Amino acid sequence: MSFVFNLVLVLHLLGMAAIVGGWFVVARSPRIAEPIVWGARAQILTGLILVGLAQAGWSDHKPDNAWVAVKLVVALAVVALSEITRAKNKRGESFNPNLVHAVGGLAVVNVLVAALWT
Ligand code: HEM
């Protein structure tokens, strides 16, 4: 059963790589590339599945509720900012380039929460 948890964790790590890697690629000329938005969406879905599987005993430990809440709020900000900025990019509207850095920076915040808040 933990194989399934680990498989979803791999998808979760690939989603993280899409956001952070995508951000590195566009850092010099900020815009939201498609993989960043898909990575942000994937993090919410795979994260919630991981929490569900852990609560059902498919992992060797259950995540703390405060930990999950912090990660969820940060991830919702990441997905909202990336969707809004991507829509503006597509329509050719002006946008604040710092929002692109906020998306990447907040994703890194969630990596820090995941790895350091144990
Ligand atoms: C931008 C969004 C996110 C990023 C960058 C991110 C990043 C990560 C990383 C790097 C890990 C691996 C940590 C490790 O194995 O030591 C992880 C694990 C995990 N994440 Fe996320 N995460 C995000 C969003 C979420 C959300 C929204 C949830 C749930 C609501 C969530 C729940 C989890 C869970 C349950 C684990 C497994 C922890 C464990 O048992 O080892 N994540 N995340």
Image (cartoon, rainbow, N blue to C red):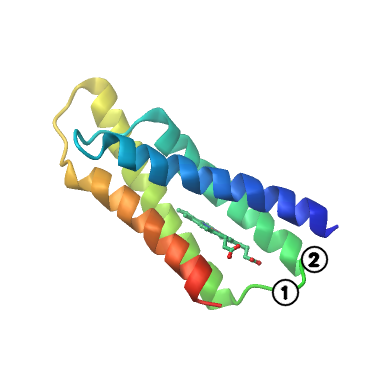
Residue drawn at (32%, 35%) of the image:
25
Q: Which residue is mark 2?
A: 56
Q: Is residue 44 left or right of residue 10?
A: left
Residue drawn at (43%, 67%) of the image:
112
Q: Callout 2: 10 Å neighbours few (<14), some, many (20+)?
A: few
Q: Are marks 1 and 2 in contact (CB under 8 Å)?
A: no
Q: Is residue 68 left or right of residue 73?
A: right
- Horizontal and vertical percent position of residue 64: 60, 77
Decide which of 7, 100 is in the foreground and name it: 7
- Horizontal and vertical percent position of residue 46: 62, 49
Residue drawn at (24%, 21%) of the image:
91
Q: Which residue is mark 1?
A: 61
- Horizontal and vertical percent position of residue 82: 34, 41
Q: Quadrant of residue 68?
A: bottom right
Q: Is mark 1 within 8 Å of ligand 1?
A: yes
Q: Is residue 36 left or right of residue 52?
A: left
